[in-house]
Image: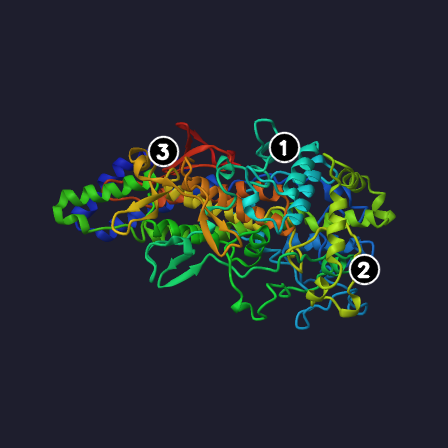
Amino acid sequence: MINLNNFLAREQLERLFLESQILFGNFFGFRKLRKWRIAILRSLATRLTNNPVEHIPNGDEAKFQNQAFVGSFTKGIPHDDTGRIIDSEQFKRFRVATHIGDFFNNLQPDLGRDSTLGWRAVQPNSDMPIRGWESPSSGLTFEMHGPDSHSVTMPPAPELGSDELTLEMAEVYWLALLRDTHFKEFQSGSTDEIIQQALAHLNALPSKGEGRRKRRLNPSNQFDAQNIFRGATDGDLIGPYLSQFLLIGTPGHEGNPKNVTDGLIGYGALKIEQKLVPAKLGLDHMTTWDVFLDVQDAANVRGTDVFKEEPDLVEFIQKRFITYPRDLATYVHFDALYEAYLNACLILLGFNAPVDLGITQLNNLFSERARELSPSGLGRVDGFALFGGPHILNLVTEVSTRALKAVRYQKFNVHCRFRPEALGGWMEAINAGISAIQMIPALSQTYEELNTDQGGINLLAKVRKHNGEQNVEPLNQLRSYIQEDRRDNSGTQTALLPMAFPEGSPMHPAYGAGHATVAGACVTMLKAFFDTDAVFVLEPNADTNKKEVKIVSRQQYDENKEQFSPVAFIPKDEGMELENAYENTTNPPLSVGDELNKIAANISIGRDMAGVHFYSDYIDSLVMGEKIAISVLLEQSLSYEIYPNQVRPSFSLTTFLGRQLKIKDGKITENGSEIDWSSLG
């Protein structure tokens, strides 16, 4: 078998042979031999990242198989009025269908409520009354570029009844209660009452997460206003909650060449706006039992979101920057999965941000070669399709498909984890006195922990009060998907998880998270291509007497600190414009790498804010997405070379877990020592 190291060692000899082919005019033979060699190299790299791995679920599916699979994802399979699936055989059929990739055979599982029974409360879309499961067989596909979907994996999710899952559910409940709290309160110095209550409650819980899921805490091993509900990296804790890449635009767009605070991103001759149409503040969904059950039975109420009331036409509603968690939930409800990272890439390119050292060295080689030819040679080549803008724009989006297929395999074929809304349903079933659910120790234990004072706060009491305020007019009038004569206007207090979306979660299991896996893959590509030590600064413009936003290298900043000032934009007031939170401060500047890590966390945890994911869905999926991107980078490091110097690109990056890696010649090194790709994640 050909060995990668042995093959690379033969390169000098092969280069001489290839050069001789050119001297004899055999250009076709030269190209053919090079293609053959690169194909072998890529094949070797692919072998490194497509070895079998063991996939281990948390055991809840087997543990609760005689209790209607209460720890598993059952959305879409018909449920009875206690919240349990009517026929456990249907779940077994569902699992068989996911493993063979066929939902159209004679053993297909039942989908949706029996039409003869009618819906309990909702009036779903007449054209498509039920929702189908989303891409359940996509994880069974294979890839010719990057790892196959089943060559990466995730650790077991927290088990039902564990302290870790109680922490995760408490976080999701609190994020629902905080949906209309300004993001400026999610940082040091916050006096917001609900933030303070969340801190007291979460700090009193027995678990703060395990392993890489352990939350980022302060030196006293406590949550505080600066670290609560933030991501897992050092950069996530620095500065404002929201990444700069979710707020600013690019310099140089038509009509306002230097103002990036309008949030307009140059997209060729078009513009992408960072402002969004906001969902109506104060309105949550699925807060009554009948509506919750209909949604679990696949009632299709998508498209009934409520935006600001006046004026009636959404296109005339005044847009705002992401200002509240509800805004971020709205963003991740409608985004084109990789759009935040495509936007970040366009912003970095628009600022002409410094690139990674390995790519800089490659570009310097171009320049040196040009100078060898003649002074006029300096304009002969430039990065475009090769390590220029189009190259990274393609890579940052291309890895998203690999990430999606890999996470679908984890969702449907391995873990089949329930969504937070389902656990909220079990909490309400116990709250309502449904004995069949009360008798399940893992569920009753979770309920007791959430329904007793922790840090002087009874979380479920706050949830019940919130839902009671939701279940009255005039809010119910805004939920057009509920039959008018079935609207509960009595102020019923339920323990259900208040949802940001009418339809609740997507029709696929929670673990892993598609958004987070894509975030891990796309952001890793950006960190590998750009200089992550570069910083955001303000620099005075002598011509305009105004300060302009720049992204400069750390060296340039360190050598010219007196001319730069720090900048960290946040939404001002109701989010119609941005302001600099670092005005007249001595804060160190925000770095590109930290803000890229932060955008990955913002998008991923934005799904938690919507109520559709847990924290472990975020961090474990993020790491898997990163590993997928590194596999593609391994191939990239072999597939491009600059002839005749035979120099290939190298990429350096710091992982989400803090490991400093270099990728070159199909190898990964950490602190100078070669490591195996399989050891990542």
Residue 490: numbered disc? 2
492 left or right, relative to 652: right
> Under tag 1, what secondary structure?
loop
Residue bearing mark 1 = 210
Between marks 1 and 3, how big is the CA–CA gap? 42 Å
**Label 3: which secondary element:** helix
Residue underneath mark 3? 6
- Marks 2 and 3, the one that precedes in the sequence: 3
Q: Residue at x 73, y 38 (%)?
A: 457
Work out which quarter of the rendered image holds the N terminus and state it: top left
Q: Where residue 563 appears, x then y in whole percent? A: 30, 39
Tally of numbered tags: 3
Camera-nearest label, 1 or 3: 1
Q: Quadrant of residue 77?
A: bottom right
Q: Residues within 10 Å of mark 2 (few under 14, many from 20)?
A: few
**Residue 284 vertical position relative to residue 547 in the rendered view, above or below:** below
The amino acid type, in three-letter code, at marker 3 is Asn
609 or 655, nearer to the observer: 609
- Decide which of tag 1 and tag 3 comes sooner along the chain: 3
